[in-house]
Image (spheres, rainbow, N blue to C red):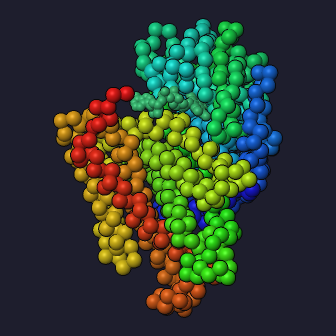
Amino acid sequence: MKYPDDIRDIKFNLFEWLDLDAVLKSEHYGEFDREQLEMVLDEALKVSRGSVSACNETGDRIGARFENGQVRLPEGFAAAYRDLASGGWISPTIGPEFGGMGLPESVGTGISEFIMGANTALGLQVLLTRGAAHLIESFGSEPLKAVYCERMYSGEWTGTMCLTESSAGSDLGEIKTKAVKQADGSYLFSGEKIFITSGEHDLTPNIIHAVLARTPGAPAGAKGLSLFVVPKFRVNPDGSLGGANDVVCAGIEHKLGIHGSPTCSLVFGTNGSCQGFLLGEEGQGISLMFQMMNAARYEVGVQGLSIASAAHQAALGYARERLQGRLFSNKTPQAPQAALVHHPEVRRSLLLQSAYVQAMRALVSYTGWCMDMAHTTTGEARDRWQGLVELFTPVCKAWCSDWGFRVTEWALQTYGGYGYTMDYPAEQYLRDCKIASIYEGTNGIQALDLVGRKFRMQDGRPVKHLMSLAAETAQALASDPILGESAQQLGAAVKAMGLVLGEIPTRENALVLTLLNAVPILDMLGHMIAGYLLLQQAQVAQGKLAALLQERGVDAKDAAAVRALLAGSPEGAFYQNKVQAAIHFAHRGLPLVAAQAVALHAGEVSPMEAIF
Ligand SMILES: Cc1cc2nc3c(=O)[nH]c(=O)nc-3n(C[C@H](O)[C@H](O)[C@H](O)COP(=O)(O)OP(=O)(O)OC[C@H]3O[C@@H](n4cnc5c(N)ncnc54)[C@H](O)[C@@H]3O)c2cc1C
């Protein structure tokens, strides 16, 4: 099946809702105009719908294989990866000095959605390569940058992120891999990493590992870690390949989804000759690695969105075709069978799927746009945008992966029994999506980051800024004839969230209450942000719809004429559905904020009293 994209909504986010002009007028991105960016998106979609999506199903059915110490990727992966590399799609947001297109992050997010949605297993290869190369660009010596960066950004070599060990999962302070400094300034490695995505494969002639390891005498815990570059094959100063660098793949995992992505156990230094190079300074490892981890967390949020969107689009296509039952308004046996989309219960599920997908896309697009604003401003303005980016990063990661997974489940349900079979893509989407809530720091760890660090950073200014933005939108739309009730729901959610943020820290048992409720608090905040952004989008869509009706000479009060127009106008239908999705989310999603606050206000701590 071809990848069922939603380029229309991506373009709405970029070109009709976000203030892209504020980004494009800056020196940084001044060479781009809207038309060029639209063309870039169209091209990225073309390759995603082509070779990238063509091997998605075979990738799942055949999967990566481990044979005689080598990892073989499924048929089609090499060609698709070559297409991505030759089109510049590995690093479209990287600057031209390293061979990239230098696109804004908000546009890069749309491109990532296409690649991830078309083939998640292959998409992971892309995001890790870009992230590892960016570490070298930011923290590597000039000779390291000269040899590695462009080769990685272009896709000639791929990259990995080597953190996890058998006793160091969430707890990176337990990392034991050793790095010992040599006379020439390089380091020799020994140790084992597990669960390393694309740690070994046959796509490219070299693989470059970004490795967290411990130097002799370093303090215990995360503060004693340093960050290194360790190539699979040694690299000569002119960039040509030397001999093997004593990094061996001991096997790959058999797992629930993303079968085309090899999850590798790597052994470093079996023969005492695994050489690597320091990035930054000794002891800075964790703080430097956070650059790659934060980028990857954001991209994993995009992964949740991408898969959910594709799952929803596929389910919608099925529901339009599949005939079952009669219209509820005409149940006589003689009446023709109706397509699933006509049944109210199916419609409810489809609009809920769509509302959550639009909410996730609004969240990641807005965060990408905040990154662009932070890149293109200075001083206080820059701090304000960067504050929002940092606040939103764990929410993008956890909220989009959790709700993305739920959307894949609702989408599968749309097919009935067929969704449970391998004849349709729904079950693969569901399996591929689950991992997003686990890697790059589990969603529990994201929630602890939010309540422990992100709420407090910059003296709490980013979260206060967010609360006032959401409250302003609720107030501004409170008396809108169509969106007013939804705006009141947003107002109630902002109030409930504000009470939790203000009151819980004053309790005697604030720490235990906060830790116990970190995941619900992140979920509440995700819903509040989503409701706020969707209402803003609905306001824009409402204006566009009114303009369309006026242009076609249709009286907005004439319900039959409006329905007739919407039936024949994909653009009209798009705006209508955007307004309806925002209203639906406001009534089904936003009340969850106050509902979850109940346990917090009651001070309910029964999990701490239970005997496990
Ligand atoms: C397919 C796949 C690909 C992966 N790719 C990579 C990769 O490329 N590079 C890499 O380095 N790693 C990778 N990982 C590893 C992944 O990041 C870890 O699995 C993840 O960080 C969790 O670690 P763990 O599995 O040891 O679980 P644990 O840390 O044992 O956690 C188990 C559960 O306990 C919770 N928990 C743990 N500690 C705490 C705490 N202090 N407070 C509250 N709750 C806690 C967690 O939220 C989780 O629900 C990958 C994993 C998989 C499955």
Up-down relation of residue 364 to residue 294 (above or below): below
Q: Position of residue 284 (x, y in %)?
A: 46, 24
Q: Residue lying furthest front in this view?
A: 333
Up-down relation of residue 263 to residue 501 (above or below): above
Q: Nearer the viewer, residue 168 or 513?
A: 513
Location of residue 2 (image quadrant): bottom right
- Identified at 72% across, 33% down, the residue is 157
Q: Quadrant of the C terminus?
A: top left
Q: Nearer the viewer, residue 421 or 378?
A: 421
- Identified at 70% across, 51% down, the residue is 421
Q: Position of residue 550 (x, y in %)?
A: 51, 88
422 relative position to 443: left or right: right
380 relative position to 265: left or right: left
511 relative position to 191: left or right: left
- Identified at 62% across, 69% down, the residue is 340
Q: Position of residue 387 (x, y in %)?
A: 38, 46
Q: Position of residue 36 (x, y in %)?
A: 65, 62
Up-down relation of residue 35 to residue 70 (above or below): below
The number of discs equals: 0
- Identified at 36% across, 51% down, the residue is 524
Q: Quadrant of the N terminus?
A: bottom right
Q: Nearer the viewer, residue 91 or 528?
A: 528
Up-down relation of residue 239 to residue 117 (above or below): above
